[in-house]
Amino acid sequence: MKKIILFGLVCIIVVTCTPMDENFKKFIENGPIVYLTRLDEQELQVVGERNRINFRWPAQTDPRGKKARIYWSSRTEMFEQDINPLVPTSFFVGPLNEGSYIFEIFIIDEFGNASVPVTVSGFAYGDSYESYLIDWKIMRTEIIDNTKKVVFARPNDPNMTGMEFEWRNRQNNLIETFVAATDSTIIHDCTALLFRHRTQYVPEGGIDKFHTPWQYYIGSVDPENVDYDIETNTVTFPQIDDANFVRNEIHWIDRFDQQPRSLTTTGNTLTLNDYNAIAFNYHAVLSVDGSEVSTTVNRKATVVLVETIRINEFYLSLQNGEQHQLEVTEILPVSATIKEVEWSSSDTQVAEVDNNGVVTARGPGQAVITAEATDGGDVIEICNVDVGFVDLDRTNWFAEPERNTDTGAALANVAAVGAPPGVNVNSPASTITNKIKSPYLSHFLPHSGATAFSLTGNDGLNNASAHFDDDSRTYLMFVKGLGGEGEQNGTIHLLGGVIIPPSDVGDKPWFIIRLDPAAPQRFNYFRLRYRESSPIPNRQLKPREITMFGSNDDDCITDDSKWVRINDTRIELPNSDMQTNYNASLIPNEPGIFNNVRNYNIETGNVMLPQINEYRYVKVLIEKWWTGDMWPSTPGANPTLQEGNTFQIAEFWLGLCQ
């Protein structure tokens, strides 16, 4: 028994004394295993290309790597690439379907040992990406000295690298060029009007090119390169070096009979027989794929149009048979090609005008004489002519201004505190409360125990007869009423520094004129002139509609029942709009002149009444006035508010036309 036990122990010892590393001998037979250095994600570049991806990394410090092994699609796809780790590595994986991928990259040594993997993502571009690319928009082209300048509107895409161009010259030679991405470029030796182009894109860091579809661009001939000789009516086009060129065409509208005209040429010169226009449209016709196409239509002005005509009179009052010479004093611009006018009359039964501008009065009434430029630009100047109109003598006319409550003196000369001499000074705050009501002027706007009145203005000229002196600088000034027609309720009035509260509602303003204390005066028309304003545009309001009354009873001043209405309906005044209420000079007896520019709108012109009237007193009631929305010129102005508090009448006439 003992022998058996001893034998077993010997066997165990023999067995257990076998070398312990026998099972691991194959792993260390070439030395101990040291893992390869993994790739640095910061140095690894994965660049998308067309249906492939480019992998790049710099030289490595671990020399043992012999292959790069890449897995994707959950390791169902694999690619291996031999590498030399001591030099930069770059290789492509493909073909790949367009789309995004997740890659695992291992470095393998010569024994098949692998590094720890690096996981990266990448995108393979393809037809879908290319179909969404934006073309480089061409804004315009210019041909200068046999070179074409192309101006672009470039897409905001860093992958856009430039544009390819192709065109054919007259010898039908195909010429190709590529220009880099800039805002404009010069294509040398290109005068072709038609070329095709496509925009090139290269994904960031890549080398594969993607393109937008080819597109044709049809340019135009710059008007600066088209010459027109007015003496010979000859047009010269630049030579078009384009195999697609067919012909040049010119079209225009005859300025006399308004009929269309056109001519064509296959060359570069064209004589316009019977040409009567201020400009022509021209374009070239090209052939593309068997069809004719037109270049952009451009317009070439051949006549510098008249912009302004000035004549020596803008209003004439003539008696039957009387003549007057109208003359053109200036035509602008000075460079206008045709400086001629044609004279015409709106009513030859009232006034005729000959070719030289001589006006002859033919019968009572009103006519407009027009001087029109003959260049077809429709610029005119007019002169209003009244024939048989005789203004009444205004020597004895009277409309009393306000008076001081203490002294009874007219307030026309009262100066504002601190106001310099010559300033419109008759409406300061200090004088508003010490006025009495003139029976000749409207009384309105009561507030807080005080009363504001119509005022007599004088622009520094002391004259109580404010609108009977042929001077547009003296006037009657009326404060607008609150709540009246033609304005908004609640507008705050500021008169002479005193605010008239918007809660007060006033009536419509009016004025009375005593024509003659002894005998009635006969009249059937009237005329108003507004105050002139220096060089700032006149923002004063204007009467829009009036009603006139007459009386021969001295009690009419205080008794409204003594008045007889002259017009059955309200009279809408001509030239009362605010849009053209511009400034004029302060030249006495020269209404409507400022910097040599006429302003018709300070005067209504003669307005006919329904019948011949005979009265000693006349009352003018102002029914409506223009509001601020008719004065759009002030920047930032509220169009619903009135800009002025007053309207100012400088002159008033009555007369007889028969």
Image (spheres, rainbow, N blue to C red):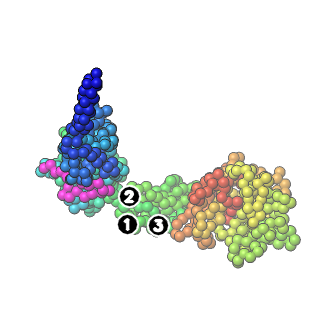
Mainly helix, strand or loop, the magenta region? strand
Task: Give residue 331's quadrant in the image.
Answer: bottom left
Residue at 22% in and 42% down: 28
The residue mark sitting in front, 2 or 1, is: 1
Q: Position of residue 524 (x, y in %)?
A: 67, 55
Q: Is residue 199 visible?
A: no
Q: CA distance from mark 3 to mark 2?
A: 18 Å
Which class describes the residues within 10 Å of circle 3: few (<14), some (14-19), or many (20+)? some
Q: Nearer the viewer, residue 338 or 303?
A: 303
Q: Is residue 545 above or below residue 292?
A: below
- Would you name the residue on which mark 1 appears? 335
Q: CA distance from mark 1 to mark 3?
A: 20 Å
Q: Is residue 576 visible?
A: yes
Residue at 16% in and 51% down: 175
| Badge 3 element | loop
| Badge 2 element | loop
Question: Pointer 2 and pointer 1: residues touching (CB < 8 Å)?
Answer: no
Q: Nearer the viewer, residue 21 or 512?
A: 21
- Would you name the residue on which mark 3 appears? 327
Residue at 76% in and 54% down: 502
Q: Is residue 481 left or right of residue 215?
A: right
Q: CA distance from mark 2 to mark 1?
A: 13 Å
Which amino acid, mark 2? Answer: Asp
Start and end of the magenta stretch? 173-190
Task: Give residue 555's quadrant in the image.
Answer: bottom right
Most extreme residue toward the bottom is 421
Which class describes the residues within 10 Å of circle 2: few (<14), some (14-19), or many (20+)? many
| Badge 1 element | loop
Label 1 vs 3, first from the N-terminus: 3
